[in-house]
Amino acid sequence: MNNTITIGITGGIGSGKSFICRILSAMGYPVFYSDQVAKELMTSDNELISEIKTLFGQEAYTVNQELNRPFLAKKIFEDQSLRNKLNELVHPRVRKEFSRITSETQSTFIFNEAAILFETGAHKNFDRMVLVTAPESLRIQRVQKRDNSSEEEIKKRMNAQWSDEKKIPLADFVIDNDEQQMLLPQIHEMIQKFSS
């Protein structure tokens, strides 16, 4: 029987959850990156590829069978029902992959990094939930630096996610990534809390 504690780690765009996960990884904890796995499945799982083409048309993929990201992003940020349908296709497969990896790990904890765990209700699938927060202005700066997106585009993506105020009551632990507080003491405190 595997007694690994599954921990969902989430936060709005630009909160720095991937950075926190890299620290956890460096500490020796397994981290499952949901978005990365989703992207891999969307280009390797033939059944899923065909379902995405049925939903969005052939244009969803390039001639080299790579995901047409700009096309898909535009579609799903403009149409909530399309976004939900895509999530319904991809999320169960990502969950199955996470379960497989969890069953094989010997670690006390396994972290699952994903952007919209609360919004989709997926937080209920984890033993614990960690929320990474940061002030909006800092998040916008980070995303601009990372993706060269306009402030308007970033705010649009932020509006598609829940606010921190709505997520904080559902989290078992909050990491404040505002570049003022030290991160390691917060991470150690979280590990200690979840170990007891």
Image (tube, helix red, strand yellow):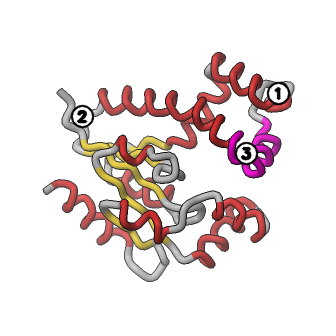
Q: Label 1: few (<14), some or many (≥20) within 10 Å?
A: few
Mark nearer the viewer, 2 or 1: 1
Instruction: Report the side of 12 relative to 24 (left or right).
Output: right
> Which amino acid is tagged 1?
Gly
Does 77 appear above or below 189? above
Identify the residue at image location x=34%, y=68%.
Answer: 184
Depth check: give the residue in front, 95 or 54: 54
Mark found first going from the N terminus, 2 or 1: 1
Q: Label 2: few (<14), some or many (≥20) within 10 Å?
A: few
Q: Is 72 a magenta residue?
A: yes
Label 2: which secondary element? loop
- The quarter holding residue 44 reads top right
Q: Main secondary structure of the magenta part?
A: helix
Instruction: Report the side of 59 relative to 44 (left or right).
Output: right
- Per the rendered image, the range of residues in magenta is 68-82
Q: What residue does disc 3 label?
A: 76
**Residue 99 screen position, x and y as percent:** 37, 30
**Residue 32 screen position, x and y as percent:** 44, 41
Determine the CA span between mark 3 and mark 1. 13 Å
Q: What residue does disc 2 label?
A: 106
Identify the residue at image location x=40%, y=58%.
Answer: 23
Does 176 appear above or below 126? below
Q: Is 37 a magenta residue?
A: no
Label 1: which secondary element? loop
Label number found at residue 105: none
Identify the residue at image location x=54%, y=61%.
Answer: 162
Q: What residue does disc 1 label?
A: 57
**Residue 52 screen position, x and y as percent:** 71, 27
> Which amino acid is tagged 2?
Gln
Determine the CA span between mark 3 and mark 2. 38 Å
Does 4 appear above or below 123? above
Determine the CA span between mark 2 and mark 1. 42 Å
